[in-house]
Structures are given as C-alpha cells and as structure tokens.
Amino acid sequence: MRISELAMTSGVTVATIKYYLREKLLPEGERTSPTQASYGEAHLQRLGVIRALVDAGVGIAGVRRVVTVLEDPPQNPYDLLGAANAAVTPEITADVDLTEATALLVRMGGSPEKCFPDQIAAVAHALAALDRAGFTVPEAVMSAYVEHLSAIGEAELAATPDTSIEDAVRYVVLGTALVEPLVLALRRVAEQIAASRRFGTG
C-alpha cells in the first residue's frame, strides 16, 4: 500500500508517518520508484506499537528503545524480558539508596544478581518519594503487595506468547506501558469495593 493508504488504514497522519520514518522508528517501505514506496502489514503493526506507546505517555526516546529491542532482540528470554521492560522504565539518574528496595526484592523471592539494576532503582526511587512525603506503607499492606504482585508477575510471564520474538516484545512492552494504568485503576476500584463492604455506601 502507498503511504496515503497506510495513513488511512492505521489512522496515523501522513505527516506523522513521515516523522517516524525520519526518526527511524518505522522501517522504510519497499521502493517502487524514486519518489514512491510500498508499505505492508509489518508497517501497520509497528505503527500500532508506536501509537500505543505514545498514547500511554512513553516519549520518543522510550519508543526508540522499544524499536531497538524489536529490531535486535536478545535471544535469551530473560534478557528479552529485561530489555523490553527497560525500554519503558524511566531512567533514574540520581543516586538512590537501594537497601530497602533490595530487601523487598528478597521478600519477593528474588536476588539483586537476578534483577536488572534499573528495576531495583525504580523501586528505590518510589520508596524514596514515599519517605520524602513522610508516608509509610503499613506492613500488612506491603505484605499484600509482595504476595499479590509476585503472583501477577508469574501469571503475566506464563501468558507471554512464544509465537515470535516480536510478539513477546510487543506483549511485554505494551503490557508494561498500557496495563499498569489498568492495574492502578482496578486498585482504586478494589478500595471502593472494600470500603462499601466495611462502611456501607453512605
């Protein structure tokens, strides 16, 4: 299909598609003449990934990291998971104490040697923000987080498709970028349900 057809089918404007092409986020089409190119299903799929990430608030730098993983994926599933997650994990530039984050990691059954540093740093950064605000997560609540998030991680990993590397990367990356807001929204719903059971609806 021509770029105008790609735009119509994908819902992405021609100008935006050309921008993605210039930024090397979208592979070049097959040249049919010096000024024309043909695009196919792979371009539609890539546009879907890009738009989903952008709509989820991932910046162009994060999208570029995802594209890098898609185009040169690690063959080891563990490294693939880490690379896909890292692509949409905000970079932590400030030094942060990893002690409490590491302790939580161990409680979840992990070890620092088997977890990507950016992920531990992200947990440490979140804990530091809580500390600055003077907020402490009650132990019973933290235990629930540890137990249930561990179960969620196991379930999500078991559901990762093994049909192709691109399918696996797409699942992990989009699952991270798009499902996290769903998890947070469901958490608030769960709190409302618990409150209605405990206190009534007013």
Image (cartoon, grey):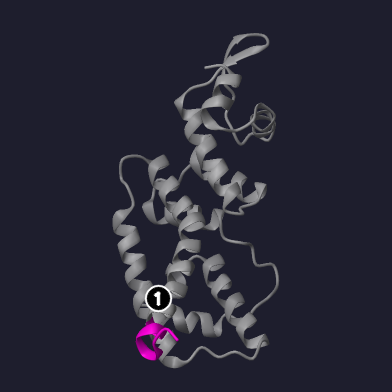
Does the segment drawn in magenta span residue 200? yes
SS class of the residue under badge 1?
helix
Determine which quarter of the picture holds residue 27: top right
Q: Residue at x 56, y 25 (%)?
A: 8
Left or right position of 59 against 145: right
Left or right position of 37 against 180: right
**Are there few (<14), some (14-19), or many (20+) residues within 10 Å of tag 1?**
few
Between 101 and 190, which is closer to the camera in this rendering?
Answer: 190
Query: Can residue 67 be seen in this snapshot?
Result: no
**Image height of 95 relative to 182, above or below:** below
Left or right position of 123 against 146: right
**Image height of 71 relative to 119, above or below:** above
Does the segment drawn in magenta span residue 84? no
Left or right position of 105 against 152: right
Q: Quadrant of the C terminus?
A: bottom left
Q: Position of residue 172 (x, y in %)?
A: 43, 53
Q: Position of residue 140 (x, y in %)?
A: 40, 91
Q: Position of residue 94 (x, y in %)?
A: 70, 72
Q: Residue at x 53, y 21 (%)?
A: 39
Q: Residue at x 67, y 86 (%)?
A: 132
Query: Can residue 122 be seen in this snapshot?
Result: yes
Q: Which residue position holds label 1? A: 190
Secondary structure mostly seen in magenta is helix
* Amino acid tagged 1: Ala
Looking at the rendered structure, the number of numbered marks drawn on it comes to 1
Determine which quarter of the picture holds residue 111: bottom left
**Image height of 140 relative to 30, above or below:** below
Between 106 and 169, which is closer to the camera in this rendering?
Answer: 169
Q: Residue at x 43, y 51 (%)?
A: 80
What residue range appears in magenta? 194-202
Between 109 and 64, which is closer to the camera in this rendering?
Answer: 64
Q: Position of residue 141 (x, y in %)?
A: 43, 87
